[in-house]
Image: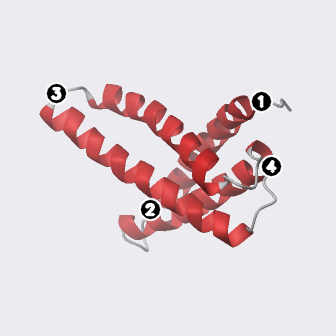
Amino acid sequence: MTNNKKIRYLFVGGFNLAFGYLVSLASYATLKPYFHIIFIAILANILNITVSFFMYKLIVFKSKGPLLKEYFRSYMVYGVATITSILLLWVLVDFCSVPFWMAQGFLVAVTAIVSYLGHNNFTFANSSK
């Protein structure tokens, strides 16, 4: 695989995006009769973030840092990215009249950049250099 961390991030991010989407669909289809959608979303997100974390740790940043410390830091990065994305989506769609599909497409790109910067400068800051 390439030595360029940004290229690796894009490939792994593409995998994580597809994986997360499929896991979310499968979780919803399987668990809908038994659990509320919020509970299903929480479970799917825990699995998706965990897989993403290990993919980034092992393939993108090649980190040898402390597992639990980096894992919890990744949740902080995803939390900031998710809350920011939700708020911006709301503003763009409801107040700026941007079509949902366009706003969401823009925010996927913004979230990818923010997440990369967060992981590079916080989650795996000292262990991938």
- In the structure shown, which secondary structural element does the residue marked by tag 3 occupy? loop
Which residue does the numbered mark 4 point to in the structure image? 62
Which amino acid lies under the numbered mark 2 shown in the image of this protein? Ala
Q: Nearer the viewer, mark 2 or mark 3?
A: 3
Whether residue 22 appears in this view of the structure is yes
Residues tagged 3 and 4 counted as in contact (Cβ below 8 A): no
Q: Which residue is mark 2?
A: 41
- Tell me which label, 2 or 4, sits earlier in the chain: 2
Q: Residues within 10 Å of mark 2 (few under 14, many from 20)?
A: some
Q: Which residue is found at the position 36% from the left and 44% from the top?
A: 85
Whole-percent x, y for residue 50 in the image:
64, 61
Residue 30 appears in view? no
Point 86% across, 32% down: residue: 1
At x 78%, y 54%, the residue is: 63
Label 1 and label 3: CA atoms lie apart by 38 Å
Left or right: where 27 falls relative to 102: right
Residue to which mark 3 is pinned: 97
Question: Quick one: 39 or 114, which is closer to the camera?
Answer: 114
Q: Nearer the viewer, mark 1 or mark 2?
A: 1
Instruction: Name the element at disc 2.
Output: helix
Check disc 1 and report its element: helix, strand or loop. Answer: loop
Where is mark 1, residue-wise? 4
Q: Are marks 2 and 4 in contact (CB under 8 Å)?
A: no
Tell me: residue 40, above or below residue 88: below
Q: Nearer the viewer, mark 3 or mark 4?
A: 4
Mark 1 / mark 3, whichever is N-terminal: 1
Which three-letter amino acid code belongs to the residue tagged 1? Asn
- Point out the frontmost of discs 2 and 4: 4
- Name the amino acid, label 3: Ser
